[in-house]
Image (tube, rainbow, N blue to C red):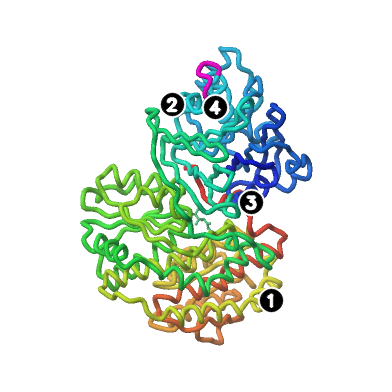
Amino acid sequence: MCGIIGCVAEEPVAGILLEGLRRVEYRGYDSAGMATISGGRLGVKKGAGRVSEIEGRHRMSSMLGSTGMAHTRWATHGGVTDANAHPHASCRETVAVIHNGIIENYIPLRKALRAKGHRFKSETDTEVIAHIVEDEYKRLGDPLKSTLAAVKKLKGQYAIAVLFQDRPDVMTGARKDAPLIVGVGKGMTFLASDVLAFIGYTDRTIFLDNYEVVEITKDSVRIVGLDGKKVKREPNQVAWELSDVSKSDYAHYTLKEINEQPRTVVSAAVQDQEKLEEFAQAVRKAKSLYITASGTSYHAGLLMKFRLNKEAKLRADVVVAGELKEHTEFLGKGSVVVALSQSGETADVMEAVKEAKKHGAKVYSIVNAAGSTLARESDGVLLLNCGPEVGVAATKSFTAQVVVANLVVDAVLGRKHPNGLAELSDAVAQALKCEGQVQELVRQYRDRPDFYFVARGYESPVAMEGALKLKELSYIHAEGMPASELKHGTLALIEKGTPVVVINPSGPIHAESLSNAEELKARGADVIGISDENDEVYRHYIHVPRVQPKFAPIVEAIPLQLLAYHMSVARRNDPDYPRNLAKSVTVK
Ligand code: F6R
């Protein structure tokens, strides 16, 4: 996944582009670059490294021109090198392209272009686009038409922005299976892969559809379909505000987003009752019901399934999105697939949706990013309403997913009005007070090679989530599992001082989890209890407030998120941008 921002304006754009680039850096942070047109010349500055490093090395912000574009890269084709960073220019450097996605047929295209005399400077799939557009522009002499002709030759996924040296008044773009959004401002128009990139300048947006090609000037937007026919689309207003995308006084976005949760668990519950009822009806009536998602969203899906089974007596299969195509025996007309995704762009989730539709199933989704591919391709959508999540680790989106999933289950059960949200918000605020205790744990265990997280029943996915969070932010090996599984292999790994987190709310499974904690202690583990009830078996105890059982995973997630965050900081990692991970995983 990569981040794209382009702008055509009445004023110099380099500063605007740099600001936008920083906001989409979560989408990829291997390399960065910028291109502008000034004095009739197309200039490009780029290199491998974080945006701040490239800015330090090349002073992108000093580039002149009122038309330009910038890119943050997450490498797929071609290593992380200066030459492979975007923008990519054509042979004569008259056309420049930035791209998010994968061009599947770039090898035959490159071969054909080389045969025609084109010379390549990078190993990327993207560079072919610049050369094809250059040829088409020579032939057709029109930016929009040449972009259209070029994308007709591409196979794969793309969101692109294109600059033409002799047309400093325009920029073109096109999308297929990767987001591209037009921002319509006063005297300035944007193309970007995320609204966050330009939210400080305008909240009026047009979400492009697959196979659409666009040409923007500082005060116009022209969209055509692949057939060249004009598409009419009015801008919509987005609800996100600039304050949502600043770090405020927090050291990192991740910490800010963790601390936003007393508010976001409430905003997530603000849903259109008709849409909620329609969603619930679909779930209730489904001939077969699947829940699909990846990573943290998958854990929220597991929680949803638990209540659907236990309380609504509905059978649901929860399948990791990347595996859904292997589980289609019961998928057909009348089936419903519930997809959960923060970004609404995860490639595996989109592939699962494609598979579901191919089999005639309906897709209902729970998504944070309004206007994302998943939101637009679903038969029904409930939004998380938790604001943009910039930190790569899913935090507030997880707890918002749990709130929305609970609303759906409650509606399936015929319980219309959510209650207990004010108490939940207070409980989350209380849970956040464990930060000092968590930091103490971090001091004690920061050098341990392994961490384990266990729980039973409804809390089992919370244990898996705790392990996922710790792995991705601290790079410590961590495993999460039902406590009942401990005896099947894991106990052999427990040594003196191995930290094991036991998530154990009071209630029917409490006593069983305590005996697992005893077993662990007997083998030398340092048991860290997260519960509303203390017990002497715990070497360390983190108290979380007692809430309705359906909300317990929300308060239990708080210390786990803080543990992962502080472990990351203590180990000198960057919690907002962990290694080898992008915010939304758009490759399969
Ligand atoms: C975990 C994390 C990832 C995502 C996964 C799915 O903290 O960020 O594991 O949960 O990539 O992403 P979405 O929810 O955007 O589909």
User: Compared with residue 96, is residue 283 higher up or lower down, i.e. above or below?
Assistant: below
User: Compared with residue 303, is residue 530 higher up or lower down, i.e. above or below?
Assistant: below
Q: Which residues are magenta?
A: 138-142
In this rendering, would 545 be left or right of 243? left
Amino acid, disc 3: Arg
Depth check, mark 2 against mark 1: the one in front is 2
Q: Which residue is mark 4?
A: 129
Q: Which residue is mark 1?
A: 440
Could you tell which of marks 3 and 4 lies nearer the N-terminus?
4
Numbered mark located on residue 364 in the image: none
Separation of residues labelled 3 and 4 (CA atoms): 29 Å
Amino acid, disc 4: Ile
Separation of residues labelled 1 and 3 (CA atoms): 25 Å
Separation of residues labelled 4 and 1 (CA atoms): 53 Å
Q: Label 4 near label 3: C-beta < 8 Å?
A: no
User: Is residue 263 on the magenta stretch?
Assistant: no
Question: Residue 178 location, x and y as percent?
Answer: 47, 41
Could you tell which of marks 4 and 1 lies nearer the N-terminus?
4
Q: How many marks?
A: 4
Q: Label 2 near label 4: C-beta < 8 Å?
A: no
Question: Looking at this view, is 128 or 75 the one in front?
Answer: 128
Question: Residue 331 location, x and y as percent?
Answer: 26, 49
